Amino acid sequence: MENVISKEQHDLAELGFCRCLLKQHRFSRINERLGKRQHLSSAELWLIYAQAQRNLGDYNNAQFGIQRALSLDRNNIDIQREEKAIKMKNDRSRTYDPIDFDSYSSSLRNEHSVYNILSIDGGGIRGIIPAIWLMSLEHKIRQPISSIFHVIAGTSTGAIIGAGLTTPSLTDSSKPRYQAADLVEIYRKKAKQVFSINENFISRMRNYVLKEAKYLDAGRHMLFSDYFGGSRLSDALAELIIPAVKSDSNVTDIFTRHGSLKDRTKNHLLTEILMCTTAAPTYFQAYKLENVLYVDGGVQANNPAMFAYDHAISANCNCDKNRIRLLSLGTGDYVSDSLNPNESRNLLFWAKNHQSVLRVLMDGPQNNIDLHLNSVLNENYHRWQIWLENPIDLDDTEENSINKLIDLAYGHLEEMEAYDNRHRLGLLVEKLQSSFES
């Protein structure tokens, strides 16, 4: 006798499967399963449908789905929170106007106060995600980032943001030259300059055949020179930490303002340090600084949070590890099974999957760092990260991709706020402001 599955069992199985897809951020798969169905069996399925549509950027269908969910269960707290997250899109500030920082005064102290640390991952064009988050933080707290955090660590694209927020103004060395909004504009308008290619046909064929560096250094160097000019590491308005990896030995060098003040031979131009930490393998050639070849710091420290934490304790004798607050910003990550374990690891395999291999090398250790710092700092540790449904390469400067990243960055803030997440921006602002007063 054949087993007959009841409608109730089928609906329960469908709900469980869609929950799994939601956990794996497979929003398009959810849309394929639920999008064509006019009558879903439960409020929870409509909720999942609405969440998927919001994450896909289809806010009209998200609104439709959440209204159907509310019609079936108006008292469900998660449905109410999702409705709030969807509505928050209409309140987004699309302006990138500068903030008047003329009246601010930094209240950060190294003694008797919470020690604030900011860490920013590497990730190429995806750096626009933490740039938008920091722009929102500056707008909320009405102070520059360099006056909020004692230590700012950044790898690769994160180092560009960190340097940008701590480089002093040309007219007033006590104030930053750039706000986070200025850095958002770099990603929106100047990203293609970073990834400049040689238009010569022979050079491009040579690159394709020999798998040499994909991009030239010229555009990147020009951008850094334009924005940072003659500024040196010791000029930074906060303790700045930038990792880069020695190409010949795979040893990570940590460039710090503290080190540059103690040893003037380490007081390099920010432009040169940024060239080192952004020299991503296969994308750019290794960069030479004082006869040492460096590659992207993300090879070993794509998430520099642990370096920042250790440095804060070792370099500052007044830093109480029990009063450290750390905000760690990711640039979006993607977990896939494209590296088939049964496939032969020959040269063709590595050539076909070099993007995935590079992603594993750079992003793999970050989860261990996240778990460790969460266990050490508990409520004083905040990790903001977006999990991408589909990978966005670090050199994807197409307008559609950038707009997608912008939407995801705002959407993450809205979701944390609507669901009253303990990491939400509003709560973080309250904690940071309390550290000024303590």
Image (cartoon, rainbow, N blue to C red):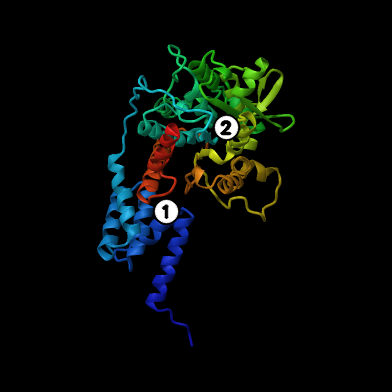
Foreground: disc 1 or disc 2: 2
Task: Please say whether residue 382 is visible from this viewpoint.
Answer: no
Residue at far bottom of view: 1
Rendering coords of residue 82 (x, y %): 33, 53
Amino acid type of the residue that numbered disc 2 sits on in the rendered structure: Thr
Location of the C terminus by quadrant is top left
Closer-to-camera residue (129/220) = 129
Q: CA distance from mark 1 to mark 2?
A: 31 Å
Task: Please say whether residue 244 is visible from this viewpoint.
Answer: yes
Q: Is residue 4 above or below residue 332?
A: below
Residue 28: give its label: 1
Which mark is first along the chain, 2 or 1?
A: 1
Residue at far right of view: 249
Q: Residue at x 45, y 12 (%)?
A: 170
Residue 53: give its label: none
Which residue is label 2 attached to? 155
Q: Residue at x 56, y 23 (%)?
A: 198
Amino acid type of the residue that numbered disc 1 sits on in the rendered structure: Ser
Rendering coords of residue 407 (x, y %): 38, 40
- Count of numbered circles in the view: 2
What SS does tag 2 mark? loop
Rendering coords of residue 258 (x, y %): 61, 23
Horizontal arrangement in the rendering, residue 372 relative to residue 188 (left or right): right
Mark 1 residue crowding within 10 angstroms, few (<14) / some (14–19) / many (20+)? some
Horizontal arrangement in the rendering, residue 297 relative to residue 219 (left or right): right
